[in-house]
Image (tube, rainbow, N blue to C red):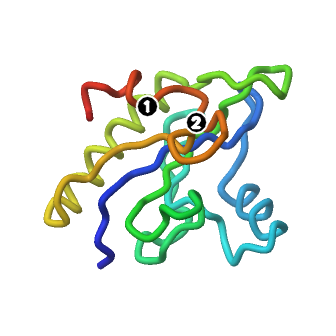
Amino acid sequence: MRKIDSIILHCSATREGQDVSVETIREWHIKRGWSDIGYHYVIYLDGSVHEARPVERMGAHCKGRNKGSIGVCYIGGVEADGKTPKDTMTEEQDIAMVNLILSIRDKYRESGKVRIHGHNEFAAKACPSFSVPKKYAWLL
């Protein structure tokens, strides 16, 4: 089992309400030359959580931070205009995100404290289109 020290949150950078699957994101990432989808989990609009890249494999979701992290992506993150970053997370996605974070922390508690970050803390990107320290302060 990999030693996990962080969970990095992402958005798919798709329009609010636009439905996208793990398979579609996998195709996007493979077209970029990656071996597979970069995220370990994807949370659909209805709050269902889908496994993507196996957790046993290092992700490809945050340059320089993949070794000890798990990448979680929610579908959305952009306004209907297709370009303006926005926290489009549905209530179902938010509940699923919190439950997934708690589950990952519980599973990897032997690794030590598992911290939560947004991709935007490590890259000049809006992703996940919100401030993780503000939205999930109570989990930090």
Q: Which residue is mark 1?
A: 132
Q: Quadrant of residue 135?
A: top left
Circles 1 and 2: CB distance less than 8 Å? yes
* Residue 51 picture location, percent across and down: 50, 60
Q: Residue at x 61, y 46 (%)?
A: 123
Q: Quadrant of residue 13?
A: top right
Pick the residue in front: 93 or 32: 32
Q: In the drawing, what numbered circle is on residue 128?
A: 2
Task: Tell me the element at label 2.
Answer: loop
Going by the numbered disc 1, the residue's amino acid type is Val
* Residue 108 picture location, percent across and down: 22, 62
Q: Residue at x 26, y 53 (%)?
A: 114
* Residue 60 picture location, percent across and down: 59, 66
- Residue 63 vs 57, above or below: the answer is above
Q: In the drawing, what numbered circle is on residue 77?
A: none
* Residue 81 picture location, percent across and down: 85, 20
Q: Quadrant of the N terminus?
A: bottom left
Q: Residue at x 49, y 40 (%)?
A: 118
Q: Is residue 134 left or right of residue 15?
A: left
- Residue 33 vs 123, above or below: the answer is below
Q: Is residue 111 left or right of residue 18?
A: left
Q: Quadrant of the C terminus?
A: top left
Going by the numbered disc 2, the residue's amino acid type is Pro
**Residue count near mark 1 (Cα–Cα under 10 Å), binned few <14, some 14–19, many ≥20:** some
